[in-house]
Amino acid sequence: MAKSVDVILVVLLLVQGVLTVLTWVVNPIIVTQQIQAAGYIASSLIILSMIVYIYYRSEDYDQEWIAAGIGMIILIMLLTYLKGGAT
Amino acid sequence: MTRKSLIDRFAGWLDENFGFTKTILRPAPEYSLRNPSYWLGAIAVLAFFTAGIAGIILLQYYDPHPDTAWESVSRIIVEVPFGNLVRNIHIYSAFSMIFVSFLHFMRNYFVVAYRRPRELMWIVGMLMGLITLMMGFTGYLLPWYALSYAAVGFGITIIKHLPQPLSGLLEYVISGYGTDAELLRKFFTFHTVLLPATLLILLAIKLHIFEVHGITEPVSRYISEEEKKLVPWFPNVFLYFVIIASVYVASILFASIVYPFGLHEKYTPGVVTIPMPEWYFMWTYAIAKTEFIEVMGEAGFNIFVSTLMIITLIFIFLPFIDRWKDRHPSERPFFLAIGAWIIVQVGLMTYLAWATAGSYIPTDVAILSIIIPTIIIFLAAYLYRLRIIKPPELVWEKFSKLKIRDLVETRPNPKHYIRTAVKFLLSIMCAGLSFRIIYGALTESIGSVWLMLGSVLLALSTIEAFKTIYLEDLRIGNLEKRFKALERWFRIG
């Protein structure tokens, strides 16, 4: 049976993959779409930090940082769509 | 046999290829990996490289000539793929480099990180700080805004008031005696070649000294042997820094989303603008535009520039001036008060310069804003030394008696994380909204009722954000750990 940390890792990597694809499909000339790209990359980096944090602290990680990480990703994506438009 | 996780196997494969575990970089004590303030210097270096990479991309499209500089920046924004984003990353990285360098400087000042054998490390660090400010100064002119041209004019006036031969030399080297084209070219050369190259050389020297001596010992006497245990650079320090670097770059991008920079009015000869330096020079600008300096005229400006120079020199040679034996802030009330005073004054002067844009700061306001914080800070520092102000150890004792622990959930499920994340997110969003309301009330004169509403909303959302973290900390037993860490730092020996 897969370790729970492996499951979390796979889920986070999948989200990162989706964000990377979204970064590639933005129009790099349009300023509002550049804001979207910034949002995707920022969220992807927060996910990376969460993955490394879980691994680094192993069983001893502080759960509030994981909650704060999820909160930050939601906030970034919300602002991305508010500032960058929905297209 | 226990199966290794995916990430463990990946790390092993990387190490096999790169040999990270055989690195010569020195191991770090465990306690330094629990506190990001030990890594402020590393964050400043990261900011330097982030700004540098973004700057190299901008360099491909920027044209350093007064007739075309502004247009080339405009072209970067509207025509270059990801141009606006790269420009924002460059600006925010540069800002964060200055801000983090200041935090690094103040932290090392408070923990007396300049004691033997680190005197030269401090001096090199101070020189790096000055070069960082000069990079900001030279970079501000490059978009050729009317605003930045006026601010650079103010900076050159300061240079002219420095003692000879320094003044003449700097005036020739930096501003030249010729045309605007010469001025822009010189600033461009300094910003893109000379200053970064000097900074890299100083960085190499500082890193060498750091690798020789390692992290400064903590000021607290209550660090356990377990926490002092050295952990290897790879994977421990490396992974810790990957986390910091990811969060840092994400924050830079976040700032670019929330407040992307626009383009100010272009400078053309004859345009009259109020000189407004960038935020990191606002405090010096505030001192220069106080009424009494203005009334004294040339002599006043000379006093201002000389004072700045003397303060800078004192801080550069601080390792040879500060002979106080103890390193704990509670045993050094004078130095503690000076440090706190600098932070408060820089903040206050920056605000005064911003609030009185286009006019002088009245003498009475200037005197009051110096005297009142001075009295409060020095009084607090000496009361702390005399044990009249108690450290926060008592706070934890009181909290632990409340038995709130029984009231909170002890077995979390995934819903709990989502709930906590959403609560935290909502409180942060409310805080952001209240900042916008306060900013609007101050700058767009939308009324004192809105100012009051904004302040109340800010207070409530801050309390809610802290409460969310507090309950979460309490649930997993971290609150005690955090209070103990705080208490250990403040406890008088």
Image (cartoon, coloured by chain):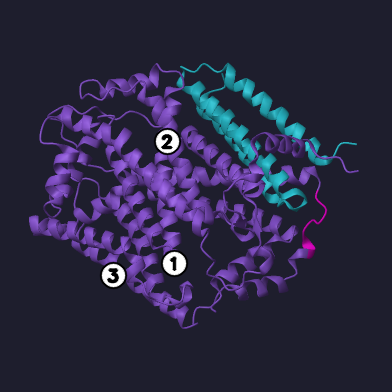
Chain colours: A cyan, B purple
Residue to which mark 1 is pinned = B112
Quadrant location of residue B187?
Answer: top left
Identify the residue under disc 2: B51
Considering the numbered disc 3 on the image, is that residue within a helix, a strand or a loop? helix
Say the numbered circle drawn on residue B371: 3
Which one is in front, B356 or B447?
Answer: B356
Q: Chain of mark 3?
A: B
In the foreground, B392 or B168: B168
Q: Find residue B440 and report its horizontal and vertical position in percent.
A: 39, 42
Q: Is residue B6 visible?
A: yes
Task: Give the distance between the C-alpha atoms of the residues marked 1 and 2, in whole angstroms.
Answer: 29 Å
Counting from the top left corner in percent of width and height, residue B309 is at 22, 58
Magenta range: B406-412
Quarter of the picture holding the C terminus of chain B: bottom right
Q: Tell me the chain of label 2.
A: B
Secondary element at tag 2: helix
Apparent side of residue B83 relative to residue B390 in the rendered image (left or right): left
Indicate which disc, 3 or 2, sits on the residue closer to the N terminus: 2
Image location of residue B51, percent across then percent down: 42, 36
Instruction: State left or right for residue B253 relative to residue A71.
Output: left
Name the residue located 66 percent from the left edge and 69 percent from the top edge. Answer: B224
Front one among B198 and B178: B198
Name the quadrant of the N terminus of chain B: top right
Q: x and y percent of residue B35 in the render? A: 58, 57
Magenta residue check for B326: no
Q: Are marks 1 and 2 in contact (CB under 8 Å)?
A: no
Horizontal side, residue B143 vs residue B36: left or right: left
Q: Alpha-carbon distance for marks 3 and 2?
A: 39 Å
Which of discs 3 and 1 lies nearer the camera? The answer is 1
The residue lying toward the viewer, choosing from B182 and B122, is B122
Residue type at mark 1 is Val
